Amino acid sequence: MTFTLYNYVLSGNCYKIRLMAALLGVEYETVAVDFYPGMEHRSPQMLSLNPAGTLPVLTAGDLVLTETQAMLTWMATSFDTSGTWFPAGDPALLGVVQQWLGFSGRLTQSAGLARLHSMLDWPVDGQAACAAAVKDLRILERHLTDRVLEGGLWIAGETPTIADVACFPYVALSPDAGLEHDAYPAIRNWLYAIRGLPGFVAMPGIHYRHEGTSGTNG
Ligand SMILES: N[C@@H](CCC(=O)N[C@@H](CS)C(=O)NCC(=O)O)C(=O)O
């Protein structure tokens, strides 16, 4: 079974799906959507798939998913043979994963909007989005610092989960909105670890761990 991703290459949310597919080694098809300047995500055809008018959209047969967190859950439970990306058998760990999936939604509304405002002049309050993004970066930095003190590296548990994939893009892309990572050593360490995962793929603004290895694992 494969799936189709309605995709915009500069979208951090679309990238979450491309990254998850690459980490799981899953093949899929893409339909390019001209998000900017075409605003094609709000075309009648796209609104009939996703009335919310957002990207990404994932289809697999009759299944239509319009929320990134649901897509990551579906992909991990459908394609991950290790069972570690979505630890369904460990209620406490799964609770933490779900908590940080929720946090990834906050990041879309903070760092994601700050970036859209900065890059595409998106009509939102850029200062408010940046302030919210700084608050979220500090929350994540504190959490990842605690994880390191516990001997951990990932957001939840001993291996990367869909929570890491969900939180990664808008944190990695925050310099696009002028929010550098100098003050966040634990975040920098975590970003570096994700960029080194087997199968990792880059996107504009997020490079491979070792420059010069474009297209292959860093
Ligand atoms: N809750 C959605 C949000 C997705 C989202 O905000 N996508 C952005 C692109 S990265 C978008 O389509 N924004 C267009 C808009 O809000 O008009 C999800 O998690 O998939």
Image (spheres, grey):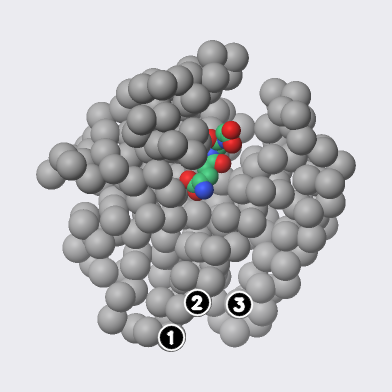
Q: Cα distance, mark 2 to mark 3?
A: 12 Å
Q: Cα distance, mark 1 to mark 2?
A: 7 Å
- 130 vs 26, left or right, is right
Q: Residues within 10 Å of mark 3 (few under 14, many from 20)?
A: some
Q: Earlier in the sequence, mark 1 or mark 3?
A: 1
- 56 vs 199, left or right, is right
Give the number of callouts: 3
Residue position for label 1: 92
Res 129 label: none
Q: Amino acid at mark 1?
A: Ala
Residue position for label 2: 96
Give the vertical position of 152 relative to 48 (above or below).
below
Task: For residue 171, say whether it is visible.
Answer: no
The image quarter containing residue 14 is top left
Give the vertical position of 147 relative to 186 (above or below).
below
Q: Residues within 10 Å of mark 2 (few under 14, many from 20)?
A: some
Q: Nearer the viewer, residue 131 or 24?
A: 131
The C terminus, quarter of image = top left
Helix, strand or loop at mark 1: helix
Res 147 label: 3
Residue closest to the far top: 38
Q: Quadrant of ligand 1?
A: top right
Task: For residue 53, say whether it is visible.
Answer: yes
Helix, strand or loop at mark 2: helix
The N terminus, quarter of image = top left
Measured as percent of width and height from the top left, residue 48 is found at 36, 30
For the point 64% across and 70% down, the residue is 144
Ligand 1 within 8 Å, label 2 CB: no
